[in-house]
């Protein structure tokens, strides 16, 4: 087990800067998830930690030792990829043993480790099978098993579940979380699936275009996104983000009109924005209530998605923007005029650069007082 530290790490391919000044402390035993849209640099960052990709600037340490110039095989890491990359001609047992045989681990020790890993991953009955005779989920378990037997200080996973179907992904997600609890190993996990990030991570690192936008626990990022990008990335359905204009500011309270559809009120740091400023206003679907008559906002129902226990109601505002509201029961019918009321303290305001101006102390106080 070991910590992983990045200090101003950069990656350039010629003139193209792919990772920009990344600094991050991953604690010993922590489960950290890198999340972000395609091409933002998640795999590159992971491959740099693995030693599969040289770093162009900064310092990378594992277990307190700088490893910039340490070869991948000497870093004490094991990586699991999206493509399982198993040897097709070898059995499951042989696939898992292979890396250990290569480094001269004693035979008895190999047998013991493979048996223990197979037990943990519930593939003991498959040890003599070949990869082609197994399901995708079983193959991915073998790939994880191959990493476990090496007893690495750090596990690195690059989208290990994205080749699996939805149900199996959910199952493997909980199994990986259990595995982490059992092994207490440091794990760094890449995904572009925000649900995986929210459910598995001790801390999430949100990346955009090679830049770390925010690092925090899932709840911190969900409740206190530092900018509109993070706000819109985490949560399903996404946070509603609509254009607004600041019409009134009183101490730490800001009111923004949303075109001709109404206005929303939130908290803000004094001096962060001014009357007349264009802002982006954010509110999560679960923080909007449908009301009869006029609420904070009004619009026309476009679509209702009935999910059984709740409905997602898509409401068109006059501006053409659509806002989603989560409601219990069946919801209204398309074409109906509806009002929407925002829970107290649930509104996020972002300045014209998309940076949050929310004063979280005030916001928390408002939420306790209201809703
Ligand atoms: N050899 C290379 N030369 C130039 N640019 C590269 C090279 N390899 C990767 N890149 C660029 O680096 C950026 C980051 O790539 P990376 O594979 O890390 O993204 P990612 O976040 O893992 O995306 P995905 O979710 O699609 O896997 C991309 O814009 C990619 O085009
Ligand atoms: Mg990738």
Image (spheres, grey):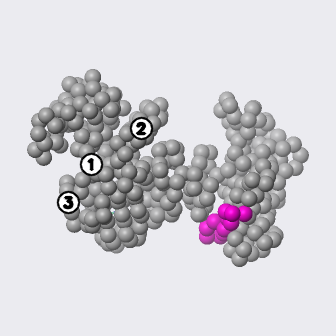
* Label 2 or label 3, whichever comes before in sequence order: 3
* Residue at left offset 80%, top offset 40%: 335
Q: Considering the numbered disc 1 on the image, is that residue within a helix, a strand or a loop?
A: loop
Categorize mark 1 by other alpha carbons within 10 Å: few (<14), some (14-19), many (20+).
some
Could you say where residue 319 lies in the image, as x and y percent from the top left?
75, 57
Look at the numbered discs 2 and 1 and tell me whether their residues touch, using CB distance below 8 Å: no
Q: CA distance from mark 3 to mark 1?
A: 15 Å
Chain part drawn in magenta: 349-362
Q: Quick check: is the Cβ at mark 1 less than 8 Å away from ligand 2?
A: no
Give the labeled residue for mark 3.
Answer: 71
Look at the numbered discs 2 and 3 and tell me whether their residues touch, using CB distance below 8 Å: no
Does residue 158 appear in the picture of this structure? no
Image quadrant in which you'd find residue 360? bottom right
Image quadrant in which you'd find residue 176? top left
User: Mark number for residue 178?
Assistant: 2
* Residue at left offset 65%, top offset 70%: 352
Could you say where residue 72 lies in the image, as x and y percent from the top left?
22, 56
User: Mark number for residue 152?
Assistant: 1
Q: CA distance from mark 2 to mark 3?
A: 30 Å
């Amino acid at each position: 087990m070991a910590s992983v530290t990045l200090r101003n790490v950069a990656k350039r391919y010629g003139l193209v800067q792919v990772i920009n000044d990344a600094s991050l402390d991953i604690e010993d035993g922590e489960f950290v998830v890198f999340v972000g849209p395609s091409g933002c640099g998640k795999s590159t960052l992971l491959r740099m930690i693995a030693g599969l990709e040289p770093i162009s600037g900064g310092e990378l340490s594992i277990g307190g030792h700088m490893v910039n110039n340490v070869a991948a095989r000497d870093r004490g890491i094991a990586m699991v990829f999206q493509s399982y990359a198993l040897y097709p001609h070898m059995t499951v047992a042989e696939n898992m043993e292979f890396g250990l045989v290569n480094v001269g681990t004693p035979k008895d020790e190999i047998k013991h480790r493979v048996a223990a890993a197979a037990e943990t991953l519930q593939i003991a009955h498959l040890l003599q099978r070949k990869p082609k005779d197994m399901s995708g989920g079983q193959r991915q378990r073998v790939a994880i098993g191959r990493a476990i037997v090496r007893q690495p200080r750090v596990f690195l996973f690059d989208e290990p579940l994205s080749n699996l179907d939805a149900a199996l992904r959910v199952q493997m997600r909980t199994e990986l979380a259990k595995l982490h609890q059992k092994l207490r190993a440091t794990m760094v996990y890449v995904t572009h699936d925000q649900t995986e990030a929210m459910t598995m991570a001790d801390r999430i690192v949100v990346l955009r275009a090679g830049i770390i936008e925010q690092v925090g626990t899932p709840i911190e990022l969900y409740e206190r996104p530092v900018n509109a990008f993070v706000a819109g990335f985490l949560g399903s359905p996404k946070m509603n983000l609509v254009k607004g204009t600041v019409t009134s500011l009183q101490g730490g309270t800001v009111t923004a009109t949303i075109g001709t559809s109404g206005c929303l009120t939130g908290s803000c740091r004094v001096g962060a924005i001014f009357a007349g400023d264009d802002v982006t206003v954010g509110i999560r679907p679960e923080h909007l209530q449908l009301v009869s008559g006029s609420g904070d906002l009004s619009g026309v129902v476009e679509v209702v998605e009935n999910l059984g226990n709740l409905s997602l109601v898509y409401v068109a505002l006059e501006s053409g923007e659509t806002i989603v509201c989560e409601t219990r029961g069946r919801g209204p019918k398309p074409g109906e005029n509806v009002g929407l009321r925002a829970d107290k303290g649930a509104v996020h305001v972002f300045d014209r650069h998309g940076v949050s101006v929310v004063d979280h102390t005030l916001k928390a106080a408002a939420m306790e007082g209201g809703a």
